[in-house]
Amino acid sequence: KTPDAQASLSGWKEGVREVLEWLVERPDAEAFLEPVDPEALGIPDYFEVIATPMDLGTVQRKFRTGRYRTAGAAVADMRLTLSNAMEYNEAGNEIHEAAKKLSKLLDKKLSTSGLKLEADEKEDGGAGT
């Protein structure tokens, strides 16, 4: 890679790291830090409703292990975490409302982050956990 390409690559990674750290530190993010455990939560239909589960802890692990090739792929998984929570839980539900709030905050944060998100394709390796 050329030095410019390498700088660009490390730049998006730094931007994603900052946004992800910021997101997981939000008070409303606690419910989204680990994979949903349908048995423990008494929601046996979760995997029937949610085709591609995702959580912010998994996003962090995938990021740390280099599984994302673009900022767009990492951000797509952050958004998937929140959209899954809003899809499964009805409006007015505490989890739905927390996800909705975080989604709006994430969009605002991304708009000022300078990250280029036009490459929204997923990384190799398929769906997360």
Image (cartoon, helix red, strand yellow):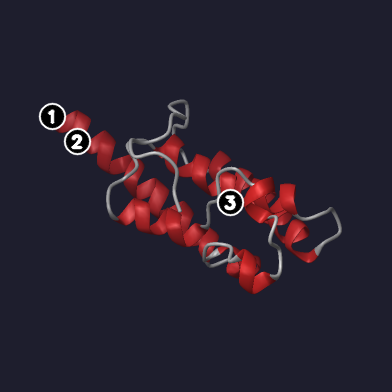
Disc 3 versus disc 2: distance between alpha carbons?
A: 29 Å
What secondary structure is found at the residue carrying circle 2?
helix
* Closer-to-camera residue (26/41): 41
Q: Which mark is residue 115?
A: none
Give the labeled residue for mark 3: 81
Residue in the picture at 43% in, 29% down: 121
Q: Is residue 127 above or below residue 54?
A: above
Residue at 31% of width from left, 56% of height from top? 64
Q: Residues within 10 Å of mark 2 (few under 14, many from 20)?
A: few
Tell whether label 2 touches label 3 (CB within 8 Å).
Answer: no
| Kind of residue indicated by mark 2 | Gln
- Residue 87, x across and y down, in percent: 73, 47
- 74 relative to 122, above or below: below
Sequence-first tag of 2 and 1: 1
Q: Residues within 10 Å of mark 1 (few under 14, many from 20)?
A: few
Residue under circle 2? 6
Q: Which mark is residue 1?
A: 1
Can you tell which quarter of the image residue 101 is in?
bottom right
* Mark 1 and mark 3 residues within 8 Å of each other at the beta carbon: no
Residue at the far right: name it.
92
> Mark 3 or mark 2, which has the lower sequence index?
2
Amino acid type at circle 3 is Thr
Which quadrant of the figure has residue 36?
A: bottom right
